[in-house]
Amino acid sequence: MKPILLVILSMGAIYLIASIYHAWQSDELSTNELVASAEPSPQELEMMVKLLTRCDKGDSEALGQLSAFRRKLASLDVQTYLEQLMLLHAGRRKIMATEFPELQAIEVGECYGSRLVREKRPKEAMNALLREAQCLDSSAQILLRQLYLYKMEGYPEQDPRILELFREQAAEGSNRAKLNMADFCLAGAGMPKDLDKILAWLNDNTLEEAQQMLGGILSNAKRTGEAKSILRRCMSHSWPWAHYEYAICLQEENNYAEAFRHLTIADSLRPNDWPTVISLAECYMQGLGVAENEATGLALFKRAADEGGDPSACFVVADLLLNGGGTAIQQKEALSYLQRAVEEGFEPALELLDELQESQTQSYRDISR
C-alpha cells in the first residue's frame, strides 16, 4: 500500500507544482494554441495586452518573452491575429512596431468598441472603449469624446468615467486627452468654462486639430496677434486651413494682396475646400488683392455651387445671373440656382424668391389693367 500511496502523493505534488507554474506564467501566450487557431481568442489577446503593458513599465523579462514570440511568429501567417491585436492595443505602437514589424503595414480603421456601438451593445461598448482609450487608441478616444459631449441612447450623459480617464491622461501628457479636456471645458461639460485652462491644454499640443481649435479661440477672443502667431506656426506644416484663417485675419486688416496670396496657397493645398473657393470668388468679384474679374468670380461661385452644393454659392450665382454679373442675364438658369438654395433653407434665397414672385404678380396686375 505504501508504494502506491507514495506514487499518488508524488503525482499530486507534480500536478500542484505545474498548476502554480501555469498561474505564474499567465501572461505568456501558448504558441501552439496560436498556430492552431486562425482567429485569436479573447483570452490570447488579453494575455498579450498584459505582456505589452509590462513592457511599457520596463519589465525586461516581459520584453524577452515578447521577443521570443516575435521569433516564433516570424514564419507564420498570423495577419488576422496581428490586426486584432492592433485593434485592442493600438496605443503601444512603438514597442509593437519594434517587435512586430508587420504591424507597420497594418491600417486599422476602427476600434473594437466602435463595432459594439454599431451593434447596439452599449454596456459592452463603453467598457471596451474605456479599456482601448486607456491603451491610447486614438479612435476609441475620439468616440468617447463624442459620447461624452452628445447624448446617445443607452449611454450615460457625460459619463464621469470618461472625464476622469481624460483628466488623468492629460496630466500624463497625452495630446489627444488634452484636446478632449479643452473641448469639454469650452462646452462647459462637467466643468465650468475657463479660458486659461483651455489655452494651457492647447498651447503646446502638437495635434493639428488642437492648433486649429487654439487659433479659433484666440481669434474669437479678439487676441489677433496671438492668433496670427499660432497660424504662422501652423502654416509651416502646410496645413491649408491655417493659410485660409490667416488670410481672413489679413482681410480684416485691409491687407488684401497678402490675403489673396494665402487664399491661393490654401486652394492649391486643398482644392475642394468651398469656403476657400468662395473667398477667392469674392476677391475676384470685388478686386480685393487681385484685378477685378467678374467672369472668374462667377466661375468660382459656380464651382462651389455645382461641385460643392454650397447654398450660399447657389444664391450668389442666382443673383449674378439675374443682374448680369460677369455674364449676360440668364433668368431661367438663375431661378434654378435660387431654387436649390431655397431647398437648402438658405434664408436670403427665400427672401429673394418672395421678392421675385411679388414683382411678377405686380407685373401681371399692371398688364391686366
Image: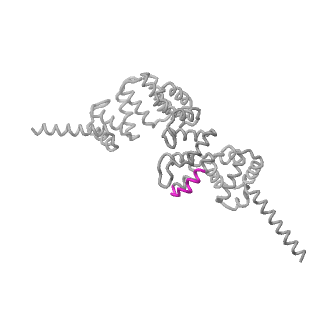
Q: Nearer the viewer, residue 155 or 287?
A: 155
Report x, y in % for residue 258. 46, 23
**Quadrant housing the C terminus:** top left
Report x, y in % for residue 144. 54, 48
Total marks shown come to 0
Q: Nearer the viewer, residue 44 or 184?
A: 184
Report x, y in % for residue 362. 16, 37
Report x, y in % for residue 299. 37, 33
Q: Name the residue: 59% across, 46% down.
A: 165
Vertical comparison of 78 with 170: above or below: below
Horizontal side of residue 245 vs 166, given as left or right: left
The stretch in magenta equals 118-130
Colour treatment of the image:
one colour
- Which quadrant of the view contains residue 173? top right
- Which quadrant of the view contains residue 202? top right
Vertical comparison of 325 with 144: above or below: above
Q: Which of 213 and 334 is in front in this view?
A: 213
Q: Name the residue: 72% across, 55% down.
A: 27
- Reply yes or no: does residue 321 show up in magenta: no
Q: Name the residue: 11% across, 39% down.
A: 368
User: Which residue is at the far bottom?
Assistant: 1
- Which quadrant of the view contains residue 255? top left
Vertical comparison of 110 with 360: above or below: below
